[in-house]
């Protein structure tokens, strides 16, 4: 489930807001601590420009500086900015207890993802309690059709919306069909397609109108998932997604 959380292109606007956002997007789960030079290289600005912006972000509680290395990391102040949005997401509130249940039942990490127009973004997660597990930070995005969560959204699209999405994801119908070979009516499966040692299984979450509003994802280390276990996780994923759908006022047929 390859993710794209970092900034992947230089800043194309002189706007301070655009610069600030580009700097914040540089921090990822893989690179949580960055120096001024690291950030400047990613955003395509001179290090002096980045040096002037970082103290402002620090004073607003959005980043913090390590007293020893003098490098920066994201600060908990970001939660104050995003907190009201996350708390207003009915789907997130509906999903939380179901995620806890399916993680407890399967022993694997479960997540809720929403489509943001260019990829699937993680908005809620319950990590596995096991020492070896697959878990990501909230806000992590998946923007490749090899990701099972992305394919859940893609297969609901049609016409111009689907064509646009496939173009943005740099794929076509033939390639998508090849990636979907392990999918079934309920679930999409990523069996090591993006990360060789990971299996991701996703199913659709619907609202009271039957519209797709999210994707439930179960992620597990591949060495723990044989064919029998994969079938078990498919069933757990499909039933959990149906459970969230029910909590949103919708109905979903649970296949045997």
Image: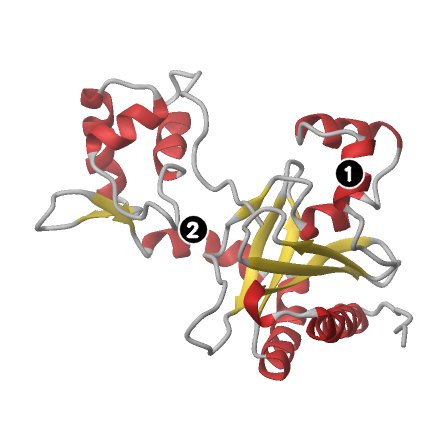
Characterize the local packing of mark 1: few (<14), some (14-19) or many (20 or more) Cα atoms within 10 angstroms: some
In the rendering, which numbered label is found on residue 176? 1
Tell me the residue at 21%/28% (across/down): 37
Residue count near mark 2 (Cα–Cα under 10 Å), binned few <14, some 14–19, many ≥20: few
Above or below, 101 against 219 in this view is below
**For residue 4, above or below residue 40:** below
Q: Position of residue 184 (x, y in %)?
A: 85, 58
Res. 26 visible in picture: yes
Q: State left or right for residue 5 relative to residue 193.
A: left
Residue 131 position by quadrant: bottom left
Q: Looking at the image, can residue 221 be seen?
A: no
43 is higher (above) or lower (below) than 244: above
Q: Secondary structure at mark 2?
A: helix
- In what quadrant of the picture does the C terminus appear? bottom right
- Tags 2 and 1 touching, CB below 8 Å: no
Pointer 2 residue: 81
Percent x, y for residue 200? Answer: 64, 59
């Amino acid at each position: 489930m390859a993710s794209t959380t970092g900034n992947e292109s230089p800043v194309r606007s002189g706007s301070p807001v655009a610069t600030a956002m580009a700097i914040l997007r540089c921090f990822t789960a893989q690179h949580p601590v960055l120096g001024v030079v690291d950030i400047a290289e990613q955003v395509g600005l001179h290090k002096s420009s980045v040096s002037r912006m970082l103290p402002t972000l620090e004073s607003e509680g959005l980043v913090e500086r390590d007293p020893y290395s003098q490098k920066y990391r994201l600060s908990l102040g970001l939660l104050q900015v995003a907190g009201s949005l996350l708390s207003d997401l009915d789907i997130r509130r509906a999903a939380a207890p179901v995620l806890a249940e399916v993680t407890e039942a399967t022993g694997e990490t479960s997540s809720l993802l929403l489509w943001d127009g260019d990829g699937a973004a993680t908005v809620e997660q319950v990590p596995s309690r096991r020492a070896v597990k697959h878990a990501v930070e909230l806000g992590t995005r998946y923007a490749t059709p090899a990701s099972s969560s992305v394919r859940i959204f893609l297969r609901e699209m049609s016409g111009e919306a689907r064509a646009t999405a496939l173009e943005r994801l740099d794929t076509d119908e033939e390639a998508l069909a090849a990636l979907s070979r392990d999918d079934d009516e309920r679930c999409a499966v990523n069996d090591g397609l993006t990360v060789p040692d990971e299996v991701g299984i996703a199913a659709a979450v619907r609202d009271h109108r039957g519209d797709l509003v999210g994707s439930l994802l179960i992620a597990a280390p591949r060495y723990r998932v044989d064919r029998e276990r994969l079938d078990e996780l498919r069933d757990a994923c499909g039933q959990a997604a149906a459970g969230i759908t029910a909590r949103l006022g919708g109905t979903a047929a649970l296949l045997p």
